[in-house]
Amino acid sequence: MSEPLSFAALPARRLRLFADPAVRALLADCLIGLEKETLRVTPAGRVAQTPHPPALGSALTHPHITTDFSEALVELVTPALARPQTVLDVLRDLHLFVYRHIGDERLWAASMPCVLDGGADIPLARYGRSNAAEMKTVYRRGLGNRYGRTMQIIAGVHFNFSLPEAFWEPYQAEVGGSQDDGPAAARDAGYMGMVRNLQRLGWMVPYLFGASPAVCRSFVQDPTTDLEVFDAQTFYYPYATSLRMGDIGYQNRQEEGTGLKANYDSLDAYTRSLTWAIRTPCPHYESIGTKVNGRWEQLNDHVLQIENEYYSTVRPKQLTDWMEFPTLALRRRGIRYVELRSVDVNPFEPLGIELEQMHFLALFMLYCLLLPSPTISPRERRWIDSNEVLAAHRGREPGLRLQCSAGAITLRDWGEQVLEAMAPLAELMDGAGGGASEGAGGSAFQAALRAQQLKMVAPEATPSARILDEMRARGEGFAEYARRLTEQHWEGFRRLELDPARAASLARLAADSRARQAQIEAHDEGDFDHFLARYFAQTETEPVTLRSPFAPADGRREERA
């Protein structure tokens, strides 16, 4: 192994913060939430053409069951909870409820989509007759026009993480910073430091958890691709971990010809860079047009239509008011949680993610919080982007070298050093008690860390290697393999019973969401053109003038995830 990297070890002063019993007690109240995307498919393994079932509720207003780009791309959203197992229990119940109402359709088991007939058979998500609903559909039409529809139905798992507000005062006292700024400033600075380190070390997520080393040939639109042939219907890279996170998948293309790169130096710099993007026209997208022959083809021809179009691997987030810009929510109320977006759906798991992985991701995010986090220079930004693609395309390749501030280093050496540096933190977290360390005899974080250390020295233990090994052993291409696991999960869910009380609760939520959609439609003001103009007229000093259909008489904010 090469010499240890100086930035891998946590500073003793910062680690001491978590050794304080009072702080460890606060860590038991860290919150985790999941957003899991999953494609509805027919029994034959094709994209479902049916609309989002009304029995699931309104995709516009349901807090836990919605759609993403396509009417067929279901998104299941758990609440943020302190116990990871409870989060998984909620996700399981959401799966069971969905399966009750989709007939003989299945939920696709993988991140990369099923057999496609091009973008034409991918139905855009619909949200009703209101202006707010139309805006969501037009935004998706714009995405399809800008980047193609096939890329938009790649599925993933978003891992949302936050620390309790009471944590930031001792954090500020130990880590430093002006006491005059208060804990809220320390919180925002701490979360932005976490975000920068999650980018620096972001290559670890596809290496450890990437589960998309191969893709159906029908997905690949570029005839000049350098992907290798696995079989007649499947492309792959021999050492790939996550094609979803590589050049052909999830990654954002806005930088090509637009000049956009979000600035993560501070929360202010981040929001300003995205605000510039949603306010600045882009010749790259002018040819699409906006309103063409009476139909809106995109919300605007700017660098970004809205902030969510920037497909970063990690985002600082805040809940928004009715029709509030996410950047304005961040500027007004700071960061509420951090969203890690680079997690593939694990096809071996019916829920797409499992408990041990959740423990490690929480530990990883805490490590990235405590690790010093200088701002990212242009040169380091190039390294970060390159390392991520290398890990996605060639992560298991023997001797693969990445680039960091200490010079070139093999992925394995760097990963081993980081995981070793996380060990004292894992021990402290297991001593925190409460829901955070549940399972594994009270040593859940240490057990999760050991599992990842095994993958670092034995690449064959990674999900991506296991997938390719199984495909070879069974003589299956990607679509056949993913369809077989989809059927296995479908059979497993059919054998489970949804608790009657939970079923009734979810049915009530569905009914309530339909009522809320009707309320939005009943309170619509003006036509869509007028609505959109008022939406984009909001600024930090001028709130949106679109009246919320849910606003109480005293005007208090209604938060919407």
Image (cartoon, rainbow, N blue to C red):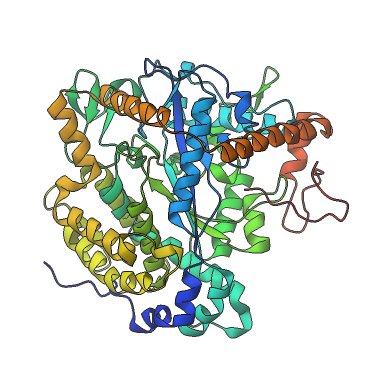
Res 187 → quadrant: bottom right
Q: Nearer the viewer, residue 436 or 373?
A: 436
The percent position of residue 443, horizontal first and vertical second, equals 31, 66
Residue 250, compared with residue 32, is above or below; it is above
Q: Is residue 488 left or right of residue 37?
A: left
For residue 293, say whether it is visible. Answer: yes
Quadrant (top left/top right/bottom left/bottom right) for the N terminus:
bottom left
- The image shows a total of numbered marks equal to 0
**Horizontal side, residue 178 vs residue 18: left or right:** right
Q: Is residue 134 left or right of residue 550?
A: left
Residue 482 percent location from the top left of the image: 30, 27
Q: Position of residue 396 (x, y in %)?
A: 17, 47
Q: Residue at x 66, y 56 (%)?
A: 329
Query: Residue 510 at x, y = what percent?
Result: 65, 34
Q: Which residue is most to the right?
A: 553
Where 301 sits versus 20, above or below? above
At 35% from the left and 19% from the top, the residue drawn is: 115
Residue at horizontal 43 percent and vertical 26 percent from the top: 150
177, above or below 34, in the image = below
- Residue 240 visible in rendering: no
